[in-house]
Image (cartoon, rainbow, N blue to C red):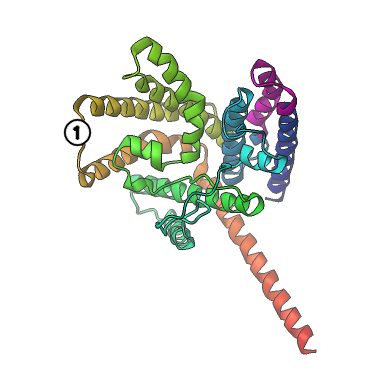
């Protein structure tokens, strides 16, 4: 684990230095092909940096932050678009945070009556505490041989969702503490989705949605509008977003497992791309909606079934379960060591004060 932490430090120092170069290059090079040529070496570097890491938690998140988020933001920056290119280039510290973390630079929104979400874009601590308790309860259940494999796979899916949401919330909270920028909310209770559009567009991994919209959806929709008209241009645009998302997941899975792509996870996203396109077309054609009490279980059931069929198996082929168990044990031992050190320090201080 110590070697992994050293590699993590090396990777992120390299990433920070590369982004400092991008910040300087963007000041000198105008938006367009010239700036793109300046930024392309960093984009290529971010494709391979996660290969220095082998753990799911550190390697997977680093791949997501650098290979996906940072690269797409840099490509948008090359053409004068995206969160890194507002009215003017942000100061270097904020540029670094916005480039590689799931946050955005935006003025604080008006006060909301919704107490489930804080002004930082995060949910309440009680919400995260409850999910962490559920996460801890799931870990020992994996060892039970009498549980049906499909149930275990469903539990893996829940574990992945909660772990990802909590991890991104921690990263976002730290970034907010250092930069003061408004966080991009990552999840909005996806199990309450009433349609596939609602799930993918407004509830699941919203930072990715906000990046893929200007980088993939808008250009494809603009081109499609000239060919098939504005009414149906959103269909190929939505499908293209899912295609790109599938390819990026294949790359992240490769970073995690070092196995050749099977393209199964791409098929998962292509299936959902077709499904969302069909849903959009159906809504445009009949303009009728199912009640939420009906559409919610249908939507969640469809996502769960297709996820267990096409998404979870490729993840398991990356040896995700043994790696996750080893990493969980390492974290527990680390926390135990920290707790022992804390107790020893408190006892020592108390003894010193008495004397």
User: Image check: 65 left or right of 52?
Assistant: left
Q: In the rendered structure, which segment of residues is drawn in magenta? A: 26-49
Q: Which image quarter holds the C terminus?
A: bottom right
Q: Based on the picture, tell me whether residue 43 belongs to the magenta stretch.
A: yes
User: Image check: 212 left or right of 61?
Assistant: left
What residue appears at the point 46 percent right and 55 percent down from the top-left corner? 111
Q: Is residue 206 visible?
A: yes
User: Image check: 308 left or right of 70?
Assistant: left
Q: Where is residue 216 in the image (x, y as percent from the top left)?
A: 48, 24
Name the residue that disc number 1 marks.
288
* Figure check: 101 above or below 115: above
Q: Can residue 263 be seen in this view?
A: no
Q: Position of residue 213 (x, y in %)?
A: 47, 29
* Figure check: 32 above or below 51: above
Q: Based on the picture, tell me whether residue 50 belongs to the magenta stretch.
A: no
What residue appears at the point 59 percent right and 31 percent down from the top-left corner? 73
- In this view, the residue in front, 346 or 171, is 171
Identify the image quadrant of residue 284. top left
Outermost residue, bottom side: 355
């Amino acid at each position: 684990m110590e070697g992994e932490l050293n590699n993590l430090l090396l990777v992120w120092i390299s990433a920070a230095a590369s982004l400092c170069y991008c910040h300087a290059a963007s000041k000198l090079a105008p938006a367009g092909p010239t700036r793109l040529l300046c930024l392309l070496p960093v984009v290529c570097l971010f494709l391979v940096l996660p290969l220095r890491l082998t753990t799911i938690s550190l390697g997977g998140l680093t791949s997501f932050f650098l290979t996906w988020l940072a690269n797409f933001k840099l490509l948008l920056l090359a053409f004068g678009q995206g969160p890194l290119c507002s009215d003017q280039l942000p100061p270097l510290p904020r540029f670094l945070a916005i480039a590689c973390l799931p946050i955005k630079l935006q003025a604080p929104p008006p006060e909301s009556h919704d107490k489930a979400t804080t002004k930082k874009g995060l949910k309440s601590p009680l919400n995260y505490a409850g999910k962490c308790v559920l996460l801890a309860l799931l870990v020992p259940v994996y060892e039970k041989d009498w549980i049906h494999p499909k149930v275990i796979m469903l539990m893996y899916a829940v574990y992945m969702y909660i772990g990802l949401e909590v991890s991104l919330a921690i990263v976002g909270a730290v970034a907010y503490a250092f930069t003061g920028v408004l966080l991009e909310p990552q999840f909005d209770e996806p199990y309450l989705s009433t349609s596939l559009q609602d799930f993918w567009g407004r509830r699941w991994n919203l930072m990715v949605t906000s990046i893929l919209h200007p980088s993939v959806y808008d250009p494809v929709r603009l081109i499609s509008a000239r060919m098939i008209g504005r009414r149906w241009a959103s269909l190929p645009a939505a499908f293209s977003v899912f295609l790109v998302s599938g390819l990026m997941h294949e790359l992240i899975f490769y970073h995690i497992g070092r196995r050749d792509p099977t393209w199964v996870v791409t098929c998962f996203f292509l299936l959902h791309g077709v499904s969302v396109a069909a849903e959009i077309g159906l809504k445009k054609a009949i303009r009728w909606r199912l009640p939420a009490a009906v559409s919610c279980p249908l939507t969640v059931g469809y996502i769960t079934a297709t996820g267990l069929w096409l998404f979870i198996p490729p993840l398991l082929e990356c040896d995700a379960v043994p790696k996750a168990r080893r990493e969980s044990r390492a974290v527990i031992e680390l926390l135990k060591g920290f707790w022992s050190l804390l107790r020893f320090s408190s006892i020592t201080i108390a003894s010193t004060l008495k004397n």
